[in-house]
Amino acid sequence: MHPRFTSVFACKPLAALMAAGLMLASVSVLAQESPDMTAVAERVDQQMTQLLGQYPVPGASIAIAYQGKLVYQRGYGMAVTESNTPVTPLTRFRIGSVSKPVTAVAVLKLFEKELPQVLDRPVFGPEGLLPDAAYPDFAQPLDQRVLKITLRELLQHTSGWGGSDYDPQYDLVNIAKARQVAAPASARDVIAYVLKQRLLDAAPGTEFFYSNFAYNVLGRLVEQKSGMSYEEAVQALVFKPAAVEDAAIAGDRRIERAANETVYYDDPRWPAVADRDGSGATGPESYSALHFKAMDATAGWIATAADLVRFADATQGRGVAPLLQPQTLALMKQRNPAQAENNYGLGWVVTRSNGVEILSHSGALTTGTYAYLQSRADGWTWAVLMNRLPIPYPPEQGVSELQAFQVAVQRGLMNAIVNPATVPSAAQ
């Protein structure tokens, strides 16, 4: 027998509730004809029960597809604890850096006819993909090495940005002051500030530094190439063809939540932070520090778990009309051969497990959001979304705790879903 669920994956300490047995929020089995899928559902529920009993996360949602067909989706716990509103498969969550594969696919689709040569074109400068004539505020950067940064290097996090503790995407008040604009600074103002005021942390192409800022630049490239806003372009180029209906750029404030969107519950061990509007007010980071219009391409989207599964399957060419041509998909999966330790392709982490190629990406917004998406060559695609990232403050003291949490979620659920004894023979 399975304990009843009302799982809670987000942020307030609900260990007592979980220990008492979680009340069922929502379950949907979409393909019950196969006993294998029933076994998968049982294992997934068992793993989620264990996770929700171990970590104080108010609410979560999971969706699983096999060979392009959605076979299981379920909500666990509370989307809104104050009103006892449960998570359902229709609940939308912020997805954090899972937005990066979305941006990468949009870029590849826009430039598909110019691949692969365009990957090695410079992004900035008079002849860049973001030309000085259209972006005069980007011209004449402080560090002349910026003029050598290529499209490939932005996609693969080898641009030279990201090697320090400074992340301009979270410095919107100071950037607004420097740019003499109202806070919070816009995505374009962030780029102009960095180009004029900051040096690269390494020469382009020499180091892997995970960079939110690089994907901000890619978002502006989507706008330049498409002639649309970033959000409009992604909806038209990526989400609509993939049959993704509930994705949108997130609102900053709790009052700005979209329909069916969860509330985000920061880990209570974290202090209040200064508001990104420069007013001097403080509040929880999830609703005070983040400005999603300035983070649109790097961490800006909300979606359901099923939305992410549909997106990944469309990227892989499963379920609906493929988003990318086969040769583009192959390029997307290529890692940097000069950096053996770098497993990042073009927008995705590319690994292998038991001989199976895996595309994946995680996303976290301290400390109210955790997301993970995985798409496998053996036909399985799955996504899990949570409304809290349980991590102590300061984060440097919680590295091992965070790693344990990620292993429990990513490896634990992968093993629950992909059990060789239950994978259909066609996938062997």
Image: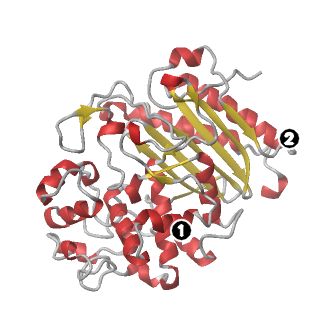
Mark 2, secondary structure of its residue: helix
Quarter of the image that includes the C terminus: bottom right
Amino acid type at circle 1 is Ala
Which residue is at the front of the view, 128 or 74? Answer: 74
Which residue is at the front of the view, 390 or 12? Answer: 12
Q: Which residue is mark 2?
A: 35
Res 255 quadrant in image = top left
In the image, residue 427 above or below residue 30: below
In front: mark 2 or mark 1?
1
Query: What separation in Å lies between label 2 and label 1 (alpha carbons)?
Result: 38 Å
Q: Report the residue at 57% width, 40% height from top.
A: 91
Side of 45 relative to 298 (left or right): right
- Image location (x, y in percent) of residue 207: 32, 63
Mark 1, secondary structure of its residue: helix
Residue density around tag 1, few if under 14, some if 14–19, many if 20 or more, within 10 Å = few
Q: Which residue is mark 1?
A: 236
